[in-house]
Image (spheres, rainbow, N blue to C red):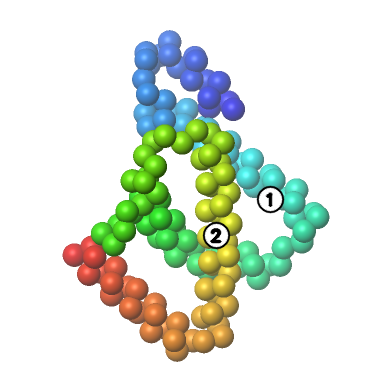
Amino acid sequence: MAGIGLERVSLRIYGQVYFWPTTPHLFITRIGFVTLVLGLATFVEHFLPVSPRTIQSLAKESLLVYFVHVVLLYGSSWNLGIKQYIGGTMGFAHAYLLVIVLVTVMFMMAFYWDRTKKSYPLPSLVLRTAVVVAAAVAVA
């Protein structure tokens, strides 16, 4: 909220600008959102204890989570992303709903992918190698 609130003050400093891609207050807004999510996660953990293994799964698979969420949102040479389907027409409520769904799906993907690697090491190694080769070919 502080980042959005400071936008009014920035009009005097920067003049009229498009808030989302250009002002330093976007950084404050994002930090506020991350702090809010971490605070909610800490609060929820008191009622629904989360195993350290679950958090470790997400930490181990953070690069996979990053790659998949970027491909889903912005697309790649293989697919169009959500951005191409809906454009910049989402309001706050829809955007936050999408964030909640995406975060949930990424948590589940990291958790189950980490378990799959431990349970089936050889097939997961073959699949990981194929994905790396496909990504290298797509970038080239």
User: What residue is drawn where x is 53% and y is 39%?
Assistant: 94
- Disc 1/disc 2 C-alpha distance (Å): 16 Å
Where residue 88 sits in the image (x, y, percent)? 39, 36
Q: Seen in the image, is 94 located left or right of residue 15?
A: right
Q: Seen in the image, is 23 located left or right of residue 1?
A: left
Check the image and report above or below for 122 versus 18: below
Which of the 4 image quadrants contains residue 93? top right
Q: Using the image as rendered, state which of residue 97 and residue 23 is in the foreground.
A: 97
The residue tagged with tag 2: helix, strand or loop? Answer: helix
User: What residue is drawn where x is 77% and y is 61%?
Assistant: 49
Give the residue at the far right of this rendering. Answer: 47
Give the residue pinned by disc 1: 41
Q: Using the image as rendered, state which of residue 126 and residue 55 is in the foreground.
A: 126
User: What residue is drawn where x is 22% and y is 69%?
Assistant: 137
Check the image and report above or below for 17 versus 132: above
- Amino acid on which disc 2 is placed: Val
Q: Seen in the image, is 102 located left or right of residue 38?
A: left
Q: Quadrant of the C terminus?
A: bottom left
Residue 139 in sight from this viewpoint: yes
Give the residue pinned by disc 2: 105
Residue 31 in sight from this viewpoint: no
Check the image and report above or below for 77 versus 84: below
The residue tagged with tag 1: helix, strand or loop? Answer: helix
